Amino acid sequence: FKNEKKCETPHFDEATWKQAFTDAFNSLIVNKTAIVAGCEAISRTLTDTTALDTESEKLQGEIEVHMELIKKCVEENAHSALDQGDYQQKYKTYVERYEVVKDRLAEIYEQRFERINKRENITRFLKLLKQNSALLTEFDEGLWFAIVDMVTIRSQHELDFKFKDGTDLPWKI
C-alpha cells in the first residue's frame, strides 16, 4: 500500500472467507457420492506407479551393468598395460552412460514420490468427506487445514478453492 501501484487484491474479513468455506464444503457434501466416485477414479489414474516401478526395475538393471563395465575397465587397466588415452575415453564413456541412467532413475523416484503423496492427500480428503455426512453449521479449522490446499481471490465476490485432492471449486459470495 506504500508504493505507487496499490495492491488490487480485494480484502476479505475472516468471517467472510470462513462462511465461504463452510458453504463451499457443504456443496461438496450435497454432491458427495459423485465427488467421491470421481476422486477415486481420478486417484487410480493419476497415482498409479506401475509403469514407473517397471521402468525403475529396468534402470536398476542397467545401472548394475554399467557399474560392472566400469569395474572391469578399471581392473583391466590395473592388470594390463593399456594405452591411457584409450582407457580414459572408455572409462569416461561408461561413467557418462551410468550418470544418464542414474539421473533418469532419480527422476523416476521423484515422480513416484509425488504420485504416492498425491494418493495420500486424495485418500485423506475422501476419508474426511465420507466422515462428514452432516452439513457444517460453522467453520471447522481442523477440516480447513486437512482439505484446503489453496484459495485464490478472483474478485470481491469470487474465490477459487483448491482442495488437497486436486479439486478446484469456484465460489461466489
Image: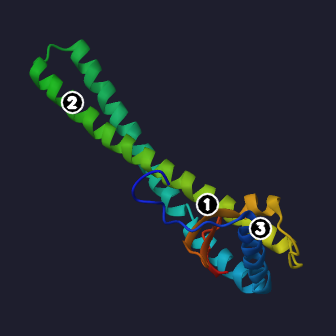
Identify the residue at horizontal 80%, vertical 60% (top origin).
141
Across and down, in percent, residue 5 comes to: 40, 59
| Distance (Cα) linking label 1 and label 2 | 39 Å
Q: How is the image coloured?
A: rainbow
Marked residue nearer the N-terminal end (3 or 1): 3
* Classed neighbour count for the residue bearing mark 1: other residues with Cα under 10 Å, few (<14), some (14–19), many (≥20): some
- Give the number of the disc on residue 15: 3
Q: Earlier along the polypeptide chain: callout 3 or callout 2?
A: 3
Give the mark toward the camera: 3 or 2.
Answer: 3
Q: Which mark is residue 92?
A: 2
Q: Quadrant of residue 82?
A: top left
Task: Give the residue type that dot 1 points to.
Answer: Lys
Question: What's the amino acid at mark 2?
Answer: Lys
In the image: residue 151, left or right of residue 6:
right
Secondary structure, mark 3, is helix
Q: Position of residue 45 (x, y in %)?
A: 57, 72
Q: Mark 1 or mark 2, which is nearer to you? A: 1
Residue 158, quarter of the rendered image: bottom right
Dot 2 crowding, Cα within 10 Å, few <14, some 14–19, many 20+: few
For the residue labelled by badge 2, is the local secondary structure a helix, a strand or a loop?
helix
Give the x, y percent position of residue 171.
64, 80
Q: Is residue 130 above or below residue 104?
A: below
Q: Secondary structure at mark 1?
A: helix
Give the alpha-carbon distance from disc 3 to disc 1, as whole Å: 30 Å
CA separation in Å, label 3 and label 2: 64 Å
Image quadrant in which the C terminus is located: bottom right
Residue 117 located left or right of residue 8: right
In the rendered structure, which disc, 1 or 2, sits on the residue that comes first in sequence? 2
The numbered mark at residue 53 is: none
Q: Which residue is mark 1?
A: 118
Q: Nearer the viewer, residue 116 or 170?
A: 170
